[in-house]
Image: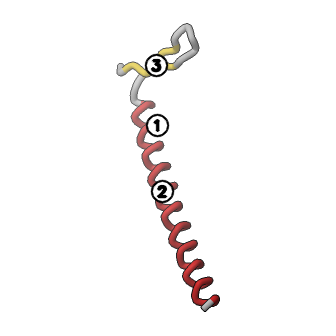
């Protein structure tokens, strides 16, 4: 019984790892797309040091 629980646990762990990896990849893809979109617009720094992106 204990062995079966452990193997089930290992399957869950690998599934969690796969899900986290998929999330990590999609997040990276979204941020890359976001950075690419930002690079298309012109950055403007305000007096507060905040960077506002204005489309050129």
Q: Is residue 8 rendered to the left or right of residue 36?
A: right
| Mark toward the viewer: 2 or 1 | 2
Task: Give the residue number, with chain letter if any, for mark 2.
Answer: 23
Residue occupying image coordinates x 58% and y 89%: 4
Instruction: Give residue 38's quadrant in the image.
Output: top left
Q: Which residue lies furthest to the top in this view?
A: 47
Q: State the residue position of label 1.
A: 35
Q: Residue at x 54, y 17 (%)?
A: 50
> Upstream in the sequence, badge 2 or badge 1?
2
Query: Mark 2 or 3, which is nearer the eye?
Result: 2
The residue that label 3 is drawn on is: 52
* Residue 16 pos. (x, y %): 53, 67
Task: Identify the residue at horizontal 60%, vertical 92% (top origin).
Answer: 1
| Spatial separation of the CA atoms under disc 2 and disc 3 | 28 Å
- Residue 35 sits above or below residue 6 on the image: above
Mark 1: few/some/many CA within 10 Å (<14, 14-19, 20+): few
Gap between marks 2 and 1, in whole Å? 18 Å
x, y percent for residue 24: 51, 55
* Element type at mark 3: strand
């Amino acid at each position: 019984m204990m062995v079966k629980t452990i193997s089930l646990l290992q399957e869950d762990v690998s599934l969690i790892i796969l899900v986290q990896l998929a999330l990590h990849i999609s997040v990276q893809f979204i941020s890359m797309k976001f950075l690419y979109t930002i690079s298309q617009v012109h950055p403007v720094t305000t007096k507060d040091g905040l960077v506002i992106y204005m489309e050129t």
